[in-house]
Amino acid sequence: MAALTEEQSILKDQATSWVEAELPVQKFREFRNANSDGGFDPKAWSAMVDMGWTGILVPEAYGGSDLGYLTFGVILEQLGRQLCASPLFASAYVGASAINLGGSDEQKQQWLPAIVDGSEILTLAVDEQPRHQRDAIACAAKASDGGFVLSGAKTFVPEGMSATAFVVAAKSDAGDVELFLVPANTTGVSRSGMATVDNRDYARVTLSDVAVPAESHLGAMSGGELYEQVLNRACAGVAMEMLGVGCFSFEMTLDYLKTRKQFGKVIGSFQALGHRAAELYSAQEMARSCAEAGVIAIDNDADDQAAMSALSKAKTGEFLFDMSNQLIQIHGGIGMTDDYDAGFYLKRARALEALYGNQALHRDRYATLLGF
Amino acid sequence: MQNANEMESFRSDVRAWVNENFPTSLQGVDLAGIAGGESGAKADDDVKVGLDAWRQKLAEKGWGAPTWPVEYGGAGLSDPQADIIGEEIHNAGAYNPIPHMTGMGVTMVGPTLLEYGSAEQKARHLKGIASGEIRWCLGLSEPNAGSDLASLSTKAEDKGDYFALNGQKVWTSGAHISQWCGALVRTDTDAGKRDGISFVMLPMQQDGVETRPIRLISGISPFCETYFTDARAEKGDLLGNLNDGWSVVKRLLQHERQSQTGGRGVSMLDSEPLHVKAQRFVGTDDSGALVDKDLRQRLVRNYMDGTAHRLTAQRITDEAAGRVEVSAAASILKNSNTRFAQQKAELALEIMGSQGIGWSGDDFAEEELGIVREWLSGKAMSIYGGSYEVQNNIISKNVLGLPETTQKG
Ligand SMILES: Cc1cc2nc3c(=O)[nH]c(=O)nc-3n(C[C@H](O)[C@H](O)[C@H](O)COP(=O)(O)OP(=O)(O)OC[C@H]3O[C@@H](n4cnc5c(N)ncnc54)[C@H](O)[C@@H]3O)c2cc1C
């Protein structure tokens, strides 16, 4: 664990105990049983708002606490451990990042306090195909009447049914990918929910000649650059959640290795499994270093933050992929049952692997950034 | 811990001192090879004189072993300060030969002596190590006692004021050029496997000690078979208590792991970044990406593994707030460093194609030949210092608290 300031440790402890007490994975199970079309518990979400988590990336002038990305990451890790569902990441991390970086003073004033108090839920609408590709944006933003007309179709938009506004990635007349703030109730926007293995809220969003005013354009940073930076930050955040999912999977597995008996001994006494656990533990330590380095690089505005973001997503992805498979394997038959939580972790692991690009995509990015 | 300003001013003092004192005659010389006593690396007289002068200057500052107390030849500095010295010497293109010149002295014997030695033993042995004058080897492994070290059979018989040693050690690094040896011997044949073992120190230049160098796959002979025939170890050179050598050696091996968690040695593999080498040998497409996509993926994985290892080593140091404990983390880091380094050497070889199978001669650049030798000698990383598998035993038992498997480790 990276060295935390006193304020950060207090928040971390608060998050850890709140998540364990109020939103353990059992709650996810209860919600899933009652709502098989995905989503989150609104009471848990408003508790997060009350605890101030929605303001962690927001400057104090707009009602936030401005504690930075490592702090937010530490909370995402805790939420990942218990598979807590909420729009916190989509709105207060990705959405707030887009506005912080690309918004004018007016846009910040309009949106940031509303993100903090939870009255607006933002989400980035980027993917148009099943495989995330940064440059595969066909959605168009044509300049018209002093504003823009957006047309295109987005898919797998996280928290897409509960979002009150979309941060839409669309190509300008000049061919750059720009970001636009589009309230969900704008004429021409329609959406439909998608049922996924992780039982979260995803939507298809269709934009049919959606007319938006010039003020919806996030233009404080040149479009292509803003789009890249928001995605880089998003990836580092996903990596922190993945770390939490993986660490908890490891703990469940280690516990089982110490308690399940076969052939008259606990299964952890078989060297094949002891070594597998040692390898997974080492991979977990490497993943933690990379995930934390990803968010720390953003806080430090480091020159290599794009590469560190790619590293964080790829290395936690590598760990979580193996870990989630071994979670099932080492639990034997019980791991295959829906009554046991292991399957939830495997399913969430793959959803996060795909989100904003899988390991292969981030290795490719890393190589490109390093110049080969 | 010192504050950041103090550390920065310490750093600039170190930098100035190194620039002033590192002899120009040693610039660009393979000091690691020479100081390590590798038979491949030969020094001419100029270099020898320069090296000895440089060693003496470092020794006077206590920088051969900067963290040791001043009275034992160290400089009484903190770990972060010692790191700064290492970094600045490296940055200046210089090299600290003392750790290499002492064999196992600075990294393993010294730290263990500091913990287990009597005042008299520390006074007698540590200065020679810190100054780089006395080279030490370690006689632990035997033909039938490798990973299962406690099954060793070399005996030490009590002869009143000394022990008489009889038996054979093997893989004794630097035995043929060392002045002293730390040996693990059986002093009670009736006690349990780990209970009848003691750790003794003995001079190598005596009739009862014979060394026979063994040639390695890399072509060099840095280690030996060591035979003891009534070899003499003084009673005053028993380290720790009689029959308690197992706790001494356990500590010693922790120091060994610690020293193998990824130091900054001089390496031919670092003479140019691997991706630059790959661009040269393999070629790139219009976008500047390597044309061999499979190689590119494996190369980037190796880069990521290297960064993950470095970040983890750094994180563990930070968590310990400057005081680097000899810790369980050492097993994790030893294995991650081993995996990364062996993979890196394999990639370098693959990139060079058939230039990567050169053994000697003008058909191959010096750098290419160096890489081939490093590829071969690097295979030892997963064998010595507790093999890769033994480290995993340690992690599963000591870090994760899993029950010991049927095999010890
Ligand atoms: C370059 C080099 C320098 C060395 N220098 C020194 C020195 O200076 N002094 C000294 O005393 N020794 C030295 N050694 C010896 C080294 O410590 C031993 O090689 C090491 O302890 C392994 O022992 P072994 O070679 O007998 O292999 P073995 O112990 O016979 O191992 C063979 C294989 O079995 C595996 N294995 C063994 N036990 C287990 C287990 N419990 N669980 C799973 N797998 C297991 C090993 O991992 C290995 O793959 C050196 C070795 C090398 C290569």
Image: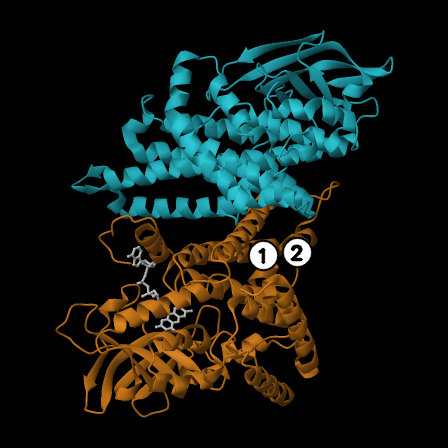
Chain colours: A cyan, B orange
Q: Position of residue B257 (x, y in %)?
A: 41, 64
Identify the residue under disc 2: B277
Give the position of the C terminus of chain B as an image quadrant: bottom left
> Which of the two labelled residues, at mark 1 and mark 2, occupies the earlier sequence position?
2
- Local crowd at mark 2 within 10 Å, few (<14), some, or many (≥20)? some
Q: Position of residue B346 (x, y in %)?
A: 53, 55
> Which residue is rendered at x = 60% and y = 23% of the image?
A117
Could you say which disc has been placed on residue B348 in the image?
1
Q: Chain of mark 2?
A: B
Indicate the quadrant where residue A91 lies. Answer: top right
Identify which amino acid the numbered label 1 is placed on.
Ala
- Tell me, yes or no, whether dots 1 and 2 are on the same chain: yes
- Image coordinates of residue A221 in percent, x first then y, are 78, 33
Residue B86 versus residue B141: which sits nearer the camera? B86
Amino acid at the residue labelled 2: Lys
Tell me the element at label 2.
helix
User: Looking at the image, which residue sits at the far left?
Assistant: B190
Q: Residue at (56%, 53%) from the top-left corner?
A: B347
Q: Chain of mark 1?
A: B
**Mark-to-mark CA distance, 1 and 2:** 8 Å
